Image (cartoon, helix red, strand yellow):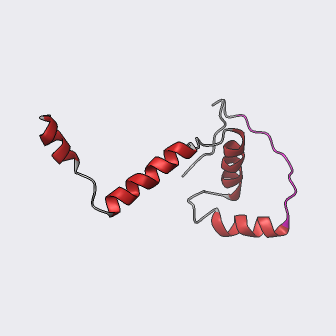
Amino acid sequence: MSTDSDAAGDGKMEKINVRVPQSLLTQIDEVWEERGYANKSEFIREALRSAVNPPTQLSTEALEHLAESRKQREQGETVSQDDVKGRLGIDD
């Protein structure tokens, strides 16, 4: 995984100094490589990007629908895509 570029795409980077608690730095040291980052800086840049542009969150309603769907699947109350296509007379 490489996120070693800036959002504007112009390649300009600026160095900043940041103080973090030792316990947080220890956690960063434990996970950055496991998650496929080339170095700690890439990991921290990606964390900063996520803070500025957080990933889309599903609404409470969408999460409830997903939970209901999982429950239906576990109880065998679902049908396959092929079954639905057959019932609706849809050909690929």
Taking the spot 60% from the left edge, 46% from the top edge, the residue there is: 3
Up/down of 70 relative to 50, above or below: below
Question: Looking at the picture, how far across and down is residue 21, in whole percent?
Answer: 85, 64
Query: Is residue 92 visible in this depiction of the protein?
Result: no
Q: Is residue 79 left or right of residue 54?
A: left
Residue name at image x 67 percent, y 70 percent: 30
Query: In the rendering, at what x and y percent does residue 37 appear?
Result: 60, 57
Residue 27: image quadrant is bottom right
User: Along the line of sight, which residue is nearer the eye, 62 or 53?
Assistant: 62
Q: Main secondary structure of the magenta part?
A: loop
Q: Nearer the viewer, residue 86 or 53?
A: 86
- Residues in magenta, as a range: 12-21
Count of residue discs = 0
Q: If the image is split into quadrants, where does the C terminus sit?
A: top left
Residue 86 sits in quarter: top left
Residue 20 falls left or right of residue 68: right
Q: Looking at the picture, how far across and down is residue 91, in whole percent?
A: 12, 34
Q: Is residue 63 visible?
A: yes
Q: Residue at x 66, y 29 (%)?
A: 8
- The verdict on residue 20 being magenta is yes
Q: Is residue 49 above or below residue 20?
A: above
Task: Please tell me whether residue 6 is drawn above or below residue 67 in the rendered image.
Answer: above
- Is residue 60 inside the magenta stretch? no
